[in-house]
Structures are given as structure tokens and as C-alpha cells.
Image (spheres, coloured by chain):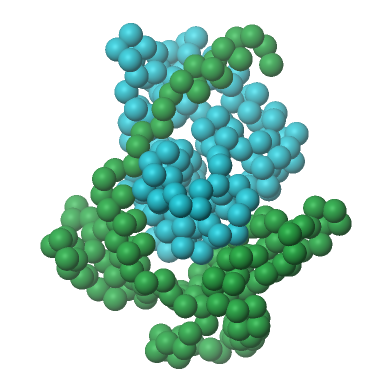
Chain colours: A green, B cyan
Amino acid sequence: MTDDLDSLERQLRGLRPRSPSAALRQAIARELARPAAVPGSPRRAWRAWPWGNAVVAGGLLAGAVLAAWVGPPSAVGRTPVGPDFVPVEARRYLLGADEEGVVTLADGTLARQVREVFVDQLTWQRAGDGATFEISLPREEVRLRQLALY
Amino acid sequence: MEAPLPDETWQTWFRDHGPKLLLCARQWTRSLADAEDVVQEAFVRYWRHQRQLGGPPLPLLLTSIRRAAADRGRREGRREAREQAVGEDPVEWFEPGDPDADERHRELAAALAALPAAQREVLVLKIWGELTFAEIGVQLDLSPHTVASRYRYALAALRERLADPCLTS
């Protein structure tokens, strides 16, 4: 690149992105303080979803079976494949979200409670030959979103 | 961007890297509130389920942020979220600079916000997201050559806008 573009690039690097708000950090703290969802665990909401789509149902069943074979989340987290594999992609497919209304948090603030059903798909790849290993984990999470009163 | 250390708290890691995540999220959302929401979703998922996978965290986090922003846009009927004009003051994207440099920082931030979304996105991912051209290509489904070209065009466009303030206003 030319000198002036290099200079412009340096000037841009001098801009410091603004720090996230205290409200965001508090929201993250609340979510991380709650127990995580267990993949594939039977819940009332799973039976409430329409299972007319056989492809989705079959895929989720395969994912649950695979997750059971691989083990609990902690085992997945320790990389179920060999050391030559590195994680290259993590996708989340949102199957649906159910608004469960407004809740009052311990500090008195209001939040929307949303139950989301999705599938996490994790992919590892081996550098030498490009071989991939993929895991699909059905999950359900309840999320609290700040309530905007404007 | 280095992976979290085994005994590092999320607060410490987020303090150091959260600003970059938020700036990237603002390229794919229409408001600060939306950007914070998708960062929250992606970061919680990463810290709970993906941190133990190892490897550089930023590609995973940025993929999650982009997809969360796209999901949010679809859920709320805003299919053109990425193409909408920036509605907030772009200066708010960055911390105030030194008094002597503050005016220049404002000019840079305004010129950056005025770039086409596709160019601005590459610039932000490269400079503040610390991704390589190859990694940006994977994120955006582009070749590294195309990403590099778009990056150079973005810088050249910025240079033009800074030289002619009428282009930025």
C-alpha cells in the first residue's frame, strides 16, 4: 500500500473501540451465573414443538444420539477427536423462540424471558488432509433480555 | 486475539476484548442495544460451551455474532438490517481521544461510518477484529484476494472523504 494509506491505517488503529456498557456486563454476569442447559435433556418445551418436519426430527434425534455417544458437555469441551484436529466452525441453528413474558429480576429490573430451541453444530478439521469431524447438539436455553421501555 | 487463560475470569477477558466484539457487532445491527444483545448472546455461548475447544476465539465469536444479528433481523422483520444507514453518532463507536487529537478522531469516525457497509465491515474486521484476509474471507464467504481489494478500496475511499469533508456529511 502507499505511504498515505499506511498512515491512514495507523491513524485508524489509534481509535479505541468504546467499552461495553455496565448494563451489558451485568446482563452477561446474570446469564453466566445461571446453570447452563444440558444438551438433549428431555424438556416439556421439546414436546410442544411441531414435529411434523421429519427431516428436522431425524436430524435432532441423530444429534442427540451422537451427543450421548460423545458424552456430556465437559467431554465435548475436551475435544473428542485427536490433537491434529482444531475447531474451525461453530454454527447455531435457531429452530424457534417462545416469548414467556416479562419477569422481575432480583435487582428489581424488568426483562423479557425468551426460551430458545436450537442446534449447535461444531466442526473440527485436520490440517493435513482436510478431514472434518462434526457434532450436532440440540439445546434449549432460557434467555433474559433487557426490556426497553421506549 | 489470544484464547482465555485457564484461570482467567470472564470479566477480565471481556474487559480486554469486549470493545472489539461490540464494534464488530455494530456493523451488523441497527442500534447499540441490538449490538449489545447479540454480543451478550455470543459471548455467553462462547464462555459456556466453546472456550474449552481451544484455538483462536475471535473467528468463533464473530461467526456467532453475525449469525445472531442475522437471526435477530429475521425475527424482527428487518431483512435489510446490514444495509440500513447508521442511525447513531459514529463517534460513539470509539472512546474519546486526547484533546489534541479529538477533532481528528471525530473526522475519522464520521468518514468510517459513511463508507459503504461492505467496505466498512472489512475494515473493521481487519483493523479492530484483528482477522487476517483469509479469516475475513471465511467469515464473509469471499476469497482472500477480494477481501484484500475491498480493504484497499475502503482505505482509499476514506482518504477521499477525509480530503473532502462534503463527502462525509
Query: Across the whole image, how many numbered discs are drawn on residues?
Result: 0
Answer whether residue A29 is visible to the viewer in this image: yes
The residue that appears at 43% across and 63% down in the rendered structure is B75
Q: Is residue B4 above or below residue A137?
A: above
Task: Kindly give the residue lying farthest to the right in the view shown.
Answer: A129
Front residue (pair A130, B67): A130
Which quarter shows the N terminus of chain B? top right
The residue that appears at 39% across and 13% down in the rendered structure is B104
Task: Kindly give the residue lying farthest to the left in the view shown.
Answer: A108
Q: Is residue A56 above or below residue B95?
A: below
Report x, y in % for residue B124: 53, 33
Front residue (pair B48, A145): B48
| Image position of A99 (left or right of A59) | left
| Image position of A76 (left or right of B113) | right
Which quarter shows the C terminus of chain B? top left
| Image position of A80 (left or right of B52) | right
Quadrant of res A77: bottom right
Report x, y in % for residue B33: 32, 48
Report x, y in % for residue A140: 45, 76
Answer whether residue B84 is visible to the viewer in this image: no
The residue that appears at 39% across and 54% down in the rendered structure is B40
The residue that appears at 33% across and 8% down in the rendered structure is B100
Front residue (pair B22, A50): B22
Report x, y in % for residue B23: 44, 38
Front residue (pair A22, A102): A22
Quadrant of res B96: top left
